[in-house]
C-alpha cells in the first residue's frame, strides 16, 4: 500500500497555510457558560469546524489569481499585457505575453488546487471525527465540527482532544488525567492535568449536565503554556490555569475517560493559532537573481531610452520628411510624443530579457532536485523506514553553499541510547572488545530475567560473576540498588525499567543481565533477585543527586540486618572521599578511567561503606534535622550527605557509551574537509557535550588548546574571550605550526557574549577555532547564535536538530534540517529537509547540494545568455527600421521561443546535469568549495553571460544583414525582404542556442538527447505548421508568413548564413573553454579526465567506507584530559519522590502507556493490578510540584478504592 | 515475508532514473577532437568561401543612378515633384557581354519599408479577396482607409506608396534603338501570387471595386495596373506583389524584370544602351536616392569571413598545442 505523503511543494511564494474563518473584532475576554448554547451564541464564537483550505470551487479562481498577481513578476507581465492592448504602443500581439503568462498562472493554479484539495480532504476528515457531547443530560455522538463553545464533551482514552477544553472531571482520582502533547509541542513525555477540585467531584453525567458554571478567560491566543481565567460557580470564584486545560491536538493517555468544557473551538484553539504562516526562506541565488533582474530592468529602461531618443531624432530628421509614405498615426502628431510611445513599444519588445518563464523554470528545476532527494536510496533508513524528504522545494541549490552547520547533540549526533560498555572492578578492566570475543554474550542460560537487547562481548566478566567473585558481585549489587529507576513487571519475568536518565537505565540493565535483577521497589524497600535468589533490602535513605554533589548514594539494610551505603558518582568527587587504604586500587582505577575517557565514554566510580547501627542512628537523626529545617534546607542536607559519604571503599568504575548515530565521526570529518564549520549547540551539560565532541572527533587530543568559557558575569566572559584570542594569536604566530583550537562556551556565558558590545569579539574568536561547542544553551540562544553568523559572516548556515528545542534554530537558519527520529515531529515540521540519520547530511550537501548548485548556476548562465541573444537583435534592428519598434522575428516565434523552442534542453540540463559522479564528490570534499565561494554564478559570471549573449545577438543580426542585403535567389528574387530576414535570423538563433546548450550539457542522458533534438525538431515542425497554407486559409489575418518556411529554407544562401553565424558564435566559445580547461583546470575537470583515462568501479562512498573504522579504532590518544561525569541527563529531586512514594502510581502509569501503544489493554492490566495486588499500589496524592492547585487537594477526601498515602 | 515488504514501503524505487544513474555520455573538450575539428571546419569554410568568391567574381553588376539630384543628370528635370508624366533617358555602356539570365532591379535607399507603423498598414483580409473588407477596411490601414466615406482598396500605406516608375531598355546599335524585351512574369514569390493574395472571384474584376476608390497616390485603379495582360491585375499584379513584400532594410532592391526572352535571352552584348524612365515616384521630398542596379551580389563576405575564421582557428590551434605538450 502506498501511503500518501503530503509534500508541500510550492512554486512561487504562495506559501500561506491557514486563513481563519472568523475575524471578529478583537475579543477582549471570553465568557463561556456551560450547557447553555443560547447564552454562548450571543458572542458568536467560532465553531469547531476548521478550515485550513484556502479556496472552494467558486472562490478558487478569483482568490488564486489575486494571490498570484501579488507576485511582482506576474504583475509586471500583466502590466506589459495592458501596454500591448494600446494600439499605438503595441509592438507585439497581445498573445506573445498572454500565452506564457497563462501557462505560468495555470501551472501554479493547478499546483495550488492540488494542495488545497488535500487540505479539504484532511479538513473533512478532522471535522467529521466523532465526539461525545453531553446534550440535555445524554451523551450524543456529534461530529467535531458541530461541537460548540460551552458544550461539555466526554473524551475516552487515546482519543484526540477535539477543542481546547477546561477539564471538569476524570475517571482518575482528584480529577487527574494524562495527556501526550507530541502534536502540539513535539514532546513525547506524558503530562498531567488536573481539574479544579469542585468540578472534579461532579463525577457523572447527571451532575455535569446541571453544571452551569461560567468561565471568564483571556481571548484566543497562541501561548501554549499559559492560560488564565476564572470559573464562577455557585457564587464562588476559582482560578483557572494552564494546568486545568486540555488543548486540541493532545491525546488522552492512561485515563479511562474525562469530561471537559469547550472554551476555544476550531480556529480559536491554541493549536490552530500556532499554525500561522510559515516564514518564507529565499536562497542567496534567489536574492542575487532578484538583484540581477532589477539590473536587467534598469538595462531595459536604458535601452528603451536610447531607442526612444533615436526615434525622436529619426522622426525629426527623416520621418517628418517621409510622412507621405510612412504617416504618423493620427493621434500622434509630433516626434516627441512618437518617441515616448516608442519607448513603451520597446519596453514590450525587449521585455524578453527578463522572461516570464525564468521563475517557473527555476521552480521546476528545484522541484526536480527535491524529488531526487526524496528518491535517494542512500538517504533511506531501513531501520526506521523513512526516506529523506525535501519539505521545502525552493532551497536546494543553497545546500551546495553551506559554510556553517549548527547541530544539536542529543538525538542528532547521538542516538540518545546509552550502553554499558566497559567496567573496572577491583583493578581489573572488563569489556575490551578484542577480535577473540566478537560474538555477543548470551545471558539466557545463566539468567532467565536477562534483557535480550543488552550487548556485551567480554565473557570473562560473566565468568567472574559465575564463580562468585565478591567484588564483582558487590559491584553489580550496587548497580541494582543505587539508582532511582522504577520498574514494571507486566508478567512474571517481563521487566520494563523506566529510568529518568538513559545512563541509569543502562547501568541497572547491566546489573540485571549479570544476575542482579532489580525487580520492584516500594518507598521503603527494594526487591531484587540476586543470582536467582530473591532478596529484599530495606531502603533507609536516598542521598539524592545534584549538580554540585555529582554523586548519589543509597543506604540499605540487607536481610541479615547489615547496613551499607552504596555510592556512585563522578570520579573527581568520589575518589576524594575514599578511605586511605584504597590508594593503590585508586591509582589503577584512575588509569582505567583515563582510558575510558579517552575513548569518549562516560564514566562513573562506584564505592560502598559499611555502617554500624550506631553510625546510622546518629546520621539519621542529623539528617532528619536537616530535612525538617525551614531555612537553608538544601545546604544542611548537603552537609549531612557529605558527612556520611566518607571513608568509602572503592569498588570500581563503569564506562557508558553514549551511542553516536551511525557514521557521525566520518560525516563530520568529511564535512570539515569540505571546509564546513560545525558548531554543536546543545542544551546538555558541558561534560557531556565535550565528551561527545571527543567521540565524534570534533575535539582531538592533539588540539593545541581547548578553551572553556564559563564566566557568569560580563567582565569574566570578556576577560576569558580576550585571553582566548590572545593565546590564539600568539600561538598562531609561527604560521608553520599547525595549531588548532576549540572553544567551549556555556549558556550563561553565551548570554553575555551575544550582547551587542561583545558579539563581534565572540564571533572572531569562535571563528578562529576549529570546533565550537555551546552547551547548556536555550532554544532561543540557539537561534541567536545562528542569527549572529548570518548577520556578520554572510555565510550560508544550516541547522540540524531533532527536538522541539531545535525549532527556533531550524527556522532561523538558511536551511533547517530535521532528524525524524524519536523526539516527536516538531523539528521535522519546522524543517526544510528531513531524514533520519545525521550521516545523510554529507550526501545531502556534498552530492545533492553540490549538484543542485552546479545545475542551477549553469541553468541561470545559459538562461540569461539565451534571452539576451534573442532580445538584443531587436535593439540592433532598431537602428535600421527608424527605431519604430519593429520586431525582427515573427510574433509566434517570440511567443514560443522561451516556452517551447529553448525551454526543455536547458531544463533537462538544470535537472540532470552532473560533472562528477556522486561517489567522487564524497571522496573529494574539496569539490564543495566553489559553492561556498560562490564561484559558479555571481555578478562577474552574469556579466560574462550577458556579454556572450550580446555578442551572439550582434552576430545574429549583422551576419544576415551583410549577407542577405545583397543576396538573391537563383531566379533573381532578392532575399532582403523582411520575412526572409526574420526566418533566417530566427533559425540561426535557435541553432546557435541549441549548439550552446549542447556545449553546456556535460551529462547527456537519453532525456537530454530527446530534449535537445526534440526542441530543434519542434522548431522546424511548428514553423512549417505556422507557415502552412491551410492555416493561412483559415486565418488570413494572423499568419503573414505563409509559405515562408519552405521558400526560405530551400535557399542555400540562407543555410550558408546560418552556418556562418553559428560558427562565428560558437568557435570563440569553444576555443575559450578549451584554453581554460588546459591552462586553468578545475578540480572537477581533472577528475572527469581521470575518470576517462582510468575508470573507477562504482563503489559508492567506497573511500569513506575504507576509513569507516574511525569509530571502532578507538585507540586514540591516551592520557588526555579525563572527562567524566555522572548521569549526565540526570535531574535532582527524584530520590525524594521515591522515598515519599509520590510518583509510584505515576510511573507505573507512564510505563503502562508504553505498553498501550501496542496493546490497548493497559486499563485491564491496571484494573487487574488494582484488584489482585492492590497492596503494591501506593499513593494517589501528588506533590505540589505536579499539582499546582495544591490548596484544593485534600488527600483524605479521596474516595477511590484502596487509596492510601505513602507517607 | 509480508512484514518485511511492509517495512520498506517507503523505500524509494531503485531505478537508474530516481537514483540519477542514467547512462550518460560525458563529452570532453579533448585536444584530439577539438584541434582536428577546428582544422576541418576551417578548411570547409575556406573551401566554401573560395567557391563563393569565385562565383561572386563572375557576377557582373551595373548600377545606374537616375535620382536626378545633380543638374547634369538627364533626370534632373523630373526630380521636381510638380512635373507630371516626366520621361527621362539614361545612356550607359556595357564593355563586355552580360551573361544571361540578366535581372533588372530597381532600388531605393534610405526608404523604411520596415517601419512598424508602415508595415502594419494594410488589410490582409482585403488582400486575400474578402469583399466584406472592401466595404469596411481594417482600422490598421489608417490614415489610408477612406477618402471621405468611400473605402480605399487596396487600403493602407504600403499599397498607397507603391513604386510606379516604369522602365524601357533599348540597345543602341548604330544609332538605332532596339527594345530589349523585359519579362515581368514570375517576379513575385510563388506563395504571394498563389496563396496569400487573391482577387475576389468577381468577373469582370472591375465590378468588385464598385463603391471603392483607388489609393490616393495611384494614377490607375488596381484592376487596371497592367493594361497588356488582363490576368496581371488587381492584387495579383506582379509589381504590386513585389512592392507589398516589405524589405527588411532601408536600402533595398526589388526585382523589376528579367531579360529571358528573344534576342537577349543569352545576355546583354557589349554596346551602348539607353534606359527610358517614366519618372513618377517622388523621392526628393524625403531626400531618398534611387538607383537602378543591374545585377550583382557579392558572396565575398562569406568567403572572406571564412578565411578570417580559419586564420583565427589556426592561431587557436597553435595555442592549444603548447599546453598539451607540457
Image (spheres, grey):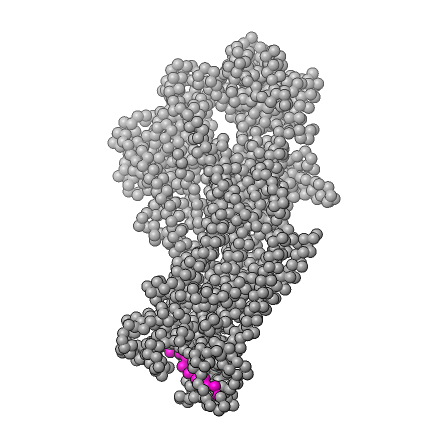
Magenta-colored stretch includes residue B166: yes
Decide if residue A110 is in sight here.
Answer: yes
Residue A1045 placement, left or right of A943:
left
Q: Which of A1180 and A334 is in front in this view?
A: A334
* Quarter of the view holding residue A656: top right
For the point 53% across and 77% down, the residue is: B60
Percent x, y for residue A701? 68, 33
* Quarter of the view holding residue A776: top right
Work out which quarter of the rendered image holds the N terminus of chain A and state it. top left
A787 up-or-down from A206: above or below: below
For the point 40% across and 88% down, the residue is: B85
Numbered marks: total: 0
Residue A352 placement, left or right of B223:
right
Percent x, y for residue B272? 51, 86
For the point 32% across and 50% down, the residue is: A59
Q: Which of A1120 and A430 is in front in this view?
A: A430
Span colored in magenta: B160-172
Amino acid at each position: 500500500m502506498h501511503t500518501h505523503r503530503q509534500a508541500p511543494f510550492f512554486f512561487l511564494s504562495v506559501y500561506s497555510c491557514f486563513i481563519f474563518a472568523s475575524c471578529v473584532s478583537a475579543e477582549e475576554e471570553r465568557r463561556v457558560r456551560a450547557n447553555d448554547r443560547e447564552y454562548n451564541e450571543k458572542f458568536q464564537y467560532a465553531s469547531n469546524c476548521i478550515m485550513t483550505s484556502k479556496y472552494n470551487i467558486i472562490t478558487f479562481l478569483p482568490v488564486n489569481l489575486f494571490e498570484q498577481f501579488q507576485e511582482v513578476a506576474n504583475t509586471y507581465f500583466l502590466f506589459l499585457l495592458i501596454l500591448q492592448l494600446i494600439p499605438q504602443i503595441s509592438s507585439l500581439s497581445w498573445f506573445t505575453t498572454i500565452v506564457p503568462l497563462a501557462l505560468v498562472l495555470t501551472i501554479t493554479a493547478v499546483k495550488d488546487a492540488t494542495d488545497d484539495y488535500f487540505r479539504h480532504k484532511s479538513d473533512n476528515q478532522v471535522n467529521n471525527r466523532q465526539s461525545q457531547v453531553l446534550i440535555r443530560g445524554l451523551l450524543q455522538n456529534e461530529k467535531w465540527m458541530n461541537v460548540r463553545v460551552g458544550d461539555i464533551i466526554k473524551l475516552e482514552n487515546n482519543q484526540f482532544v477535539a477543542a481546547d477544553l477546561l477539564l471538569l472531571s476524570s475517571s482518575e482520582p482528584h480529577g487527574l488525567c494524562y495527556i501526550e502533547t507530541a502534536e502540539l509541542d513535539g514532546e513525547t513525555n506524558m503530562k498531567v492535568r488536573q481539574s479544579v477540585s469542585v468540578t472534579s467531584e461532579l463525577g457523572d453525567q447527571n451532575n455535569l449536565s446541571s453544571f452551569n458554571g461560567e468561565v471568564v478567560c483571556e481571548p484566543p491566543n497562541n501561548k501554549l503554556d499559559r492560560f488564565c481565567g476564572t470559573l464562577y460557580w455557585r457564587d464562588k470564584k476559582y482560578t483557572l490555569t494552564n494546568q486545568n486545560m486540555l488543548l486540541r491536538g493532545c491525546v488522552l493517555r492512561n485515563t479511562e475517560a474525562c469530561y471537559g468544557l469547550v472554551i476555544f473551538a476550531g480556529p480559536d484553539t491554541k493549536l490552530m493559532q500556532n499554525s500561522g504562516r510559515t516564514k518564507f526562506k529565499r536562497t542567496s541565488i534567489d536574492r542575487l537573481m532578484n538583484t540581477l533582474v532589477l539590473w536587467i530592468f534598469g538595462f531595459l529602461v536604458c535601452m528603451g531610452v536610447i531607442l526612444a531618443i533615436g526615434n525622436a531624432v529619426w522622426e525629426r530628421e527623416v520621418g517628418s520628411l517621409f510622412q507621405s509614405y510612412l504617416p504618423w498615426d493620427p493621434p500622434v502628431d509630433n516626434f516627441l510624443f512618437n518617441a515616448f510611445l516608442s519607448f513603451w513599444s520597446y519596453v514590450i519588445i525587449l521585455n524578453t530579457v527578463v522572461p516570464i518563464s525564468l521563475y517557473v523554470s527555476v521552480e521546476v528545476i528545484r522541484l526536480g532536485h527535491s524529488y531526487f532527494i526524496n528518491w535517494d536510496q542512500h538517504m533511506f533508513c531501513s531501520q526506521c523506514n523513512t526516506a529523506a524528504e525535501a519539505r521545502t522545494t525552493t532551497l536546494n541549490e543553497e545546500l551546495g553553499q553551506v559554510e556553517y552547520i549548527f547541530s544539536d547533540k542529543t538525538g542528532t549526533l547521538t542516538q540518545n541510547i546509552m550502553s554499558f560498555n566497559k567496567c573496572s572492578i577491583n583493578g581489573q578492566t572488563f569489556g575490551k572488545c578484542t577480535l577473540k570475543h566478537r560474538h555477543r554474550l548470551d545471558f539466557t542460560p545463566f539468567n532467565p530475567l536477562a534483557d535480550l537487547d543488552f550487548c556485551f562481548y567480554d565473557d570473562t566478566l560473566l565468568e567472574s560473576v559465575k564463580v562468585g567473585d565478591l567484588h564483582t558481585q558487590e559491584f553489580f549489587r550496587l548497580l541494582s540498588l543505587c539508582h532511582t529507576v522504577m520498574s514494571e513487571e507486566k508478567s512474571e519475568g517481563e521487566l520494563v525499567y523506566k529510568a529518568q536518565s538513559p545512563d541509569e537505565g543502562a547501568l541497572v540493565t547491566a546489573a540485571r543481565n549479570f544476575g542482579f535483577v532489580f525487580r520492584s521497589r516500594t518507598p521503603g524497600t527494594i526487591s531484587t533477585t540476586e543470582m536467582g535468589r530473591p532478596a529484599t533490602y530495606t531502603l533507609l535513605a536516598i542521598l539524592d543527586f545534584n549538580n554540585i554533589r555529582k554523586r548519589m548514594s543509597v543506604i540499605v539494610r540487607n536481610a541479615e540486618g547489615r547496613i551499607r551505603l552504596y555510592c556512585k558518582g563522578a570520579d573527581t568527587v568520589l575518589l576524594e572521599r575514599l578511605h586511605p587504604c584504597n590508594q593503590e586500587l585508586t591509582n589503577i582505577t584512575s588509569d582505567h578511567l583515563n582510558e575510558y575517557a579517552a575513548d569518549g565514554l562516560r564514566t562513573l566510580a562506584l564505592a560502598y561503606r559499611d555502617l554500624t547501627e550506631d553510625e546510622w542512628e546518629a546520621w539519621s537523626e542529623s539528617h532528619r534535622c536537616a530535612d525538617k529545617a525551614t531555612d537553608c534546607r538544601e545546604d544542611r542536607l548537603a552537609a549531612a550527605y557529605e558527612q556520611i559519604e566518607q571513608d568509602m571503599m572503592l569498588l570500581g568504575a563503569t564506562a557508558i557509551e553514549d551511542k553516536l548515530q551511525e557514521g557521525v565521526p566520518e560525516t563530520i570529518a568529511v564535512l570539515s574537509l569540505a571546509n564546513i564549520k560545525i558548531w554543536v549547540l546543545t542544551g546538555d551539560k558541558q561534560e557531556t557535550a565535550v565528551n561527545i565532541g571527543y567521540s565524534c572527533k570534533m575535539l582531538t587530543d592533539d588540539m593545541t588548546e581547548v578553551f572553556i568559557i564559563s564566566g557568569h558575569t560580563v567582565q569574566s566572559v570578556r576577560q576569558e574571550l580576550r585571553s582566548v584570542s590572545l593565546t590564539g594569536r600568539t600561538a598562531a604566530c609561527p604560521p608553520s605550526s599547525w595549531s588548532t583550537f576549540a572553544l567551549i562556551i556555556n549558556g550563561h556565558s553565551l548570554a553575555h557574549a551575544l550582547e551587542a558590545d561583545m558579539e563581534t569579539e565572540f564571533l572572531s574568536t569562535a571563528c578562529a577555532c576549529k570546533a565550537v561547542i555551546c552547551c547548556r544553551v536555550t532554544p532561543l540562544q540557539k537561534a541567536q547564535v545562528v542569527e549572529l553568523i548570518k548577520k556578520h559572516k554572510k555565510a550560508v548556515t544550516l541547522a540540524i536538530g531533532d527536538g522541539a528545542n531545535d525549532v527556533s534554530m531550524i527556522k532561523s537558519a538558511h536551511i533547517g534540517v530535521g532528524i525524524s527520529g524519536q523526539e516527536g515531529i516538531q523539528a521535522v515540521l519546522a524543517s526544510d529537509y528531513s531524514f533520519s540519520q545525521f550521516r545523510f547530511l554529507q550526501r545531502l550537501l556534498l552530492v545533492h547540494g553540490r549538484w543542485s548548485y552546479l545545475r542551477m548556476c549553469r541553468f541561470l548562465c545559459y538562461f540569461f545568455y539565451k534571452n539576451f541573444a534573442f532580445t538584443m537583435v531587436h535593439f540592433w534592428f532598431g537602428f535600421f527600421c527608424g527605431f519604430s519598434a519593429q520586431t525582427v522575428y515573427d510574433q509566434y516565434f517570440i511567443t514560443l521561443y522561451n516556452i517551447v523552442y529553448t525551454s526543455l534542453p536547458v531544463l533537462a540540463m538544470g535537472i540532470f546535469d552532473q560533472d562528477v559522479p556522486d561517489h567522487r564528490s564524497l571522496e573529494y570534499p574539496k569539490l564543495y568549495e566553489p559553492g561556498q565561494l560562490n564561484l559558479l554564478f555571481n555578478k562577474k559570471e552574469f556579466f560574462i553571460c550577458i556579454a556572450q549573449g550580446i555578442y551572439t545577438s550582434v552576430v545574429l543580426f549583422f551576419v544576415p544583414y551583410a549577407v542577405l542585403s545583397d543576396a538573391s535567389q537563383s531566379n533573381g528574387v532578392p532575399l532582403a525582404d523582411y520575412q526572409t530576414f526574420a526566418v533566417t535570423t530566427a533559425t540561426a538563433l535557435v541553432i546557435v542556442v541549441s549548439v550552446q546548450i549542447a556545449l553546456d550539457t556535460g551529462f547527456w542522458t537519453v532525456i537530454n538527447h530527446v530534449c535537445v533534438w526534440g526542441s530543434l525538431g519542434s522548431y522546424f515542425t511548428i514553423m512549417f505548421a505556422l507557415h502552412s497554407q491551410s492555416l493561412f486559409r483559415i486565418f488570413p489575418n494572423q499568419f503573414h508568413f505563409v509559405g515562408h518556411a519552405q521558400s526560405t529554407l530551400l535557399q542555400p544562401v540562407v543555410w550558408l548564413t546560418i552556418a556562418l553565424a553559428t560558427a562565428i558564435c560558437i568557435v570563440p566559445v569553444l576555443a575559450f573553454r578549451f584554453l581554460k580547461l588546459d591552462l586553468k583546470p578545475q578540480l572537477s575537470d581533472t577528475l572527469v579526465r581521470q575518470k576517462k583515462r582510468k575508470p573507477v568501479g562504482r563503489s559508492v562512498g567506497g573511500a569513506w567506507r575504507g576509513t569507516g573504522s574511525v569509530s571502532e579504532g578507538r585507540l586514540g590518544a591516551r592520557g588526555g584530559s579525563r572527562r567524566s561525569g555522572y548521569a549526565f541527563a540526570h535531574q535532582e529531586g527524584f530520590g525524594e519522590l521515591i522515598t515519599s512514594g509520590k510518583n509510584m502510581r505515576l510511573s507505573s502509569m507512564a510505563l503502562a502507556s508504553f505498553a498501550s501503544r501496542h496493546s490497548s489493554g493497559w486499563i485491564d492490566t491496571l484494573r487487574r493490578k488494582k484488584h489482585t495486588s492492590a497492596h503494591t499500589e501506593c499513593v494517589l496524592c501528588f506533590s505540589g510540584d505536579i499539582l499546582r492547585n495544591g490548596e484544593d487537594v485534600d488527600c483524605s477526601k479521596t474516595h477511590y478504592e484502596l487509596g492510601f498515602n505513602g507517607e | 515475508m509480508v512484514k518485511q515488504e511492509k517495512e520498506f514501503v517507503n523505500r524509494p524505487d531503485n531505478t537508474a532514473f530516481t537514483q540519477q544513474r542514467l547512462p550518460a555520455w560525458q563529452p570532453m573538450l579533448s585536444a584530439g577532437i577539438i584541434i582536428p575539428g577546428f582544422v576541418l571546419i576551417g578548411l570547409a569554410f575556406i573551401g566554401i568561401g573560395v567557391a563563393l568568391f569565385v562565383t561572386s567574381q563572375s557576377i557582373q553588376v551595373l548600377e545606374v543612378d537616375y535620382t536626378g539630384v545633380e543638374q547634369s543628370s538627364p533626370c534632373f528635370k523630373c526630380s521636381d515633384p510638380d512635373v507630371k508624366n516626366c520621361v527621362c533617358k539614361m545612356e550607359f555602356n556595357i564593355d563586355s557581354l552580360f551573361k544571361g539570365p540578366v535581372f533588372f532591379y530597381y532600388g531605393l535607399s534610405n526608404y523604411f519599408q520596415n517601419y512598424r507603423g508602415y508595415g502594419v498598414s494594410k488589410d490582409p483580409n482585403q488582400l486575400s479577396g474578402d469583399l466584406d473588407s472592401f466595404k469596411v477596411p481594417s482600422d490598421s490601414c489608417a490614415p489610408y482607409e477612406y477618402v471621405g466615406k468611400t473605402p480605399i482598396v487596396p487600403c493602407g500605406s504600403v499599397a498607397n506608396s507603391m513604386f510606379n516608375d516604369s522602365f524601357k531598355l533599348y540597345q543602341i546599335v548604330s544609332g538605332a534603338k532596339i527594345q530589349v524585351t523585359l519579362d515581368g512574369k514570375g517576379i513575385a514569390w510563388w506563395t504571394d501570387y498563389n496563396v496569400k493574395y487573391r482577387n475576389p472571384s468577381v468577373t469582370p474584376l472591375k465590378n468588385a471595386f464598385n463603391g471603392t476608390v483607388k489609393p490616393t497616390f495611384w494614377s490607375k485603379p488596381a484592376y487596371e495596373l497592367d493594361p497588356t495582360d488582363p490576368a496581371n491585375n488587381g492584387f495579383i499584379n506582379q509589381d504590386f506583389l513585389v512592392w507589398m513584400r516589405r524589405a527588411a532594410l532601408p536600402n533595398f532592391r526589388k526585382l523589376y524584370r528579367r531579360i529571358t526572352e528573344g534576342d537577349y535571352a543569352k545576355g546583354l552584348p557589349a554596346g551602348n544602351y539607353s534606359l527610358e524612365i517614366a519618372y513618377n515616384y517622388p523621392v526628393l521630398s524625403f531626400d531618398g536616392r534611387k538607383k537602378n542596379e543591374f545585377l550583382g551580389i557579392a558572396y565575398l563576405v562569406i568567403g572572406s569571413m571564412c578565411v578570417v575564421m580559419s586564420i583565427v582557428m589556426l592561431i587557436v590551434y597553435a595555442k592549444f598545442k603548447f599546453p598539451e605538450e607540457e
